Image (spheres, rainbow, N blue to C red):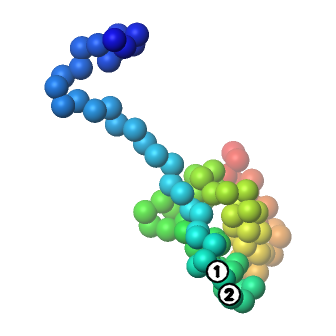
Amino acid sequence: MSSRPDLLFRPKGYFPVVSVAPDYRIPFVSVLGASQEDLFERVIENAWPDLAEPDTMKRLGYATPGQRALLAITLFMREVDNGGLQQFFGKLNRRNL
């Protein structure tokens, strides 16, 4: 018998919805023999923001520590290459307002 009252009287066939965090890890064998550039791309590919989940911060929260580091560095480099440090920090300040 469950000690949780909400589980005592549930309708037949009722199953609570359990959300599972995405897993962006990749199998080790998928990077065997890969060049450094390919390794870098494969490690962050699954965690990269896309149309299904465009929120970069949410994706970073689900990524492994190594993926978070590589994603953060890549996003920083792309912003700086696109408009310099002023653009990067300008966008950062607008997000935090």
- Mark 2: secondary structure: loop
The number of numbered badges drawn on the structure is: 2
- Mark 1: secondary structure: helix
**Is residue 70 shown to the viewer in this render?**
yes
In the displayed structure, does residue 50 sit left or right of residue 56? left
What residue is drawn where x is 69% and y is 54%? 94
What residue is drawn where x is 40% and y is 38%? 18
> Which is more toward the observer, 63 or 54?
63
- Compute the Cα span from label 2 to label 1: 5 Å
Provide residue 86's location: percent of width, then percent of height.
81, 68
Provide residue 29's location: percent of width, then percent of height.
61, 77
The image quarter containing residue 17 is: top left
The image quarter containing residue 87 is: bottom right
Identify residue for label 1: 31
The three-letter amino acid code for the residue at tag 1 is Val
What residue is drawn where x is 16% and y is 25%? 12
| Picture layout, residue 57 above or below residue 11 | below
Judge the density around disc 2: few (<14), some (14-19), many (≥20) Cα neighbours within 10 Å.
few
Q: Which mark is residue 34?
A: 2
In the displayed structure, does residue 76 sit left or right of residue 24? right
What residue is drawn where x is 29% and y is 13%? 8
The three-letter amino acid code for the residue at tag 2 is Ala
The image quarter containing residue 5 is: top left
Quadrant, the N terminus: top left
| Picture layout, residue 53 above or below residue 21 | below
> Which is more toward the observer, 37 or 27?
27
| Picture layout, residue 68 above or below residue 80 | above
In the displayed structure, does residue 41 sit left or right of residue 5? right
Provide residue 36's location: percent of width, then percent of height.
75, 85
Kindly check if marks 2 and 1 are in contact, taking CB atoms under 8 A apart as contact.
yes
